[in-house]
Image (cartoon, rainbow, N blue to C red):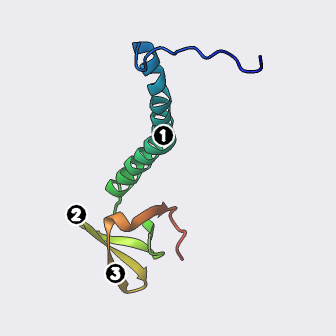
Amino acid sequence: MFISTAYAQTAAGGDLQSSLMSMLPLVLMFVVLYFVMIRPQMKRQKEHRAMIDALAKGDEVATAGGLLGKVTRLGDAYLSLEIASGVEVQVQRTAVVQVLPKGSIK
């Protein structure tokens, strides 16, 4: 009276449609992960690589360590920054995080 009758269910993994529907959340999570995390990171890396390749002598830059200076010499992997009058340091090209507008360093 209070308990309903139990019926046997079909065998697990019986049809292709149910297995595809169980994979759908996993596929949707990967698509969301790609558009939210992976794609923007790849775009930032591409922009940073283009900025580093476009560095020229006389550009004013900021490094990841917080140094501000003017580029005096360029090499393949390193560049020289003049951080004060007569003071030059060598840093890796990849340490440059921003190219500053001309005249921002006094």
Q: CA distance from mark 2 to mark 1?
A: 35 Å
Q: Of all residues shown, which one is farthest toward the bottom?
A: 86
Q: Which residue is mark 2?
A: 76
Residue drawn 49% across and 37% down?
35
Left or right, 56 with reference to 2: left
> Label 2's element?
loop
The residue at which mark 1 appears reads as 33
| Amino acid carrying mark 1 in the image | Leu
Identify the residue shown where x is 23% and y is 67%.
75
Sequence order check: which comes first, mark 2 or mark 1? 1
Q: Is residue 38 above or below residue 29?
A: below
Residue closest to the far right: 2
Q: Nearer the viewer, residue 57 or 53?
A: 53
| Residue 44 horizontal/vertical position (percent) | 44, 49
Q: Residues within 10 Å of mark 1 (few under 14, many from 20)?
A: few
The residue carrying mark 3 is 89
N-term-proximal mark, 3 vs 2: 2
What is the crowding at mark 2: few (fewer than 14 residues within 10 Å), some, or many (at least 20)? few
Amino acid type of the residue that numbered disc 3 sits on in the rendered structure = Val
Q: Nearer the viewer, residue 49 or 83?
A: 49
Image quarter hosting the N terminus: top right
Q: Earlier in the sequence, mark 1 or mark 3?
A: 1
Q: Is residue 91 above or below residue 49?
A: below
Q: Amino acid at mark 2?
A: Asp
Q: CA distance from mark 1 to mark 3?
A: 41 Å
Q: Say if residue 9 shows up in the picture.
A: yes
Q: Could you tell me residue 39's position as x and y percent?
A: 44, 41
On residue 101, which mark appears? none
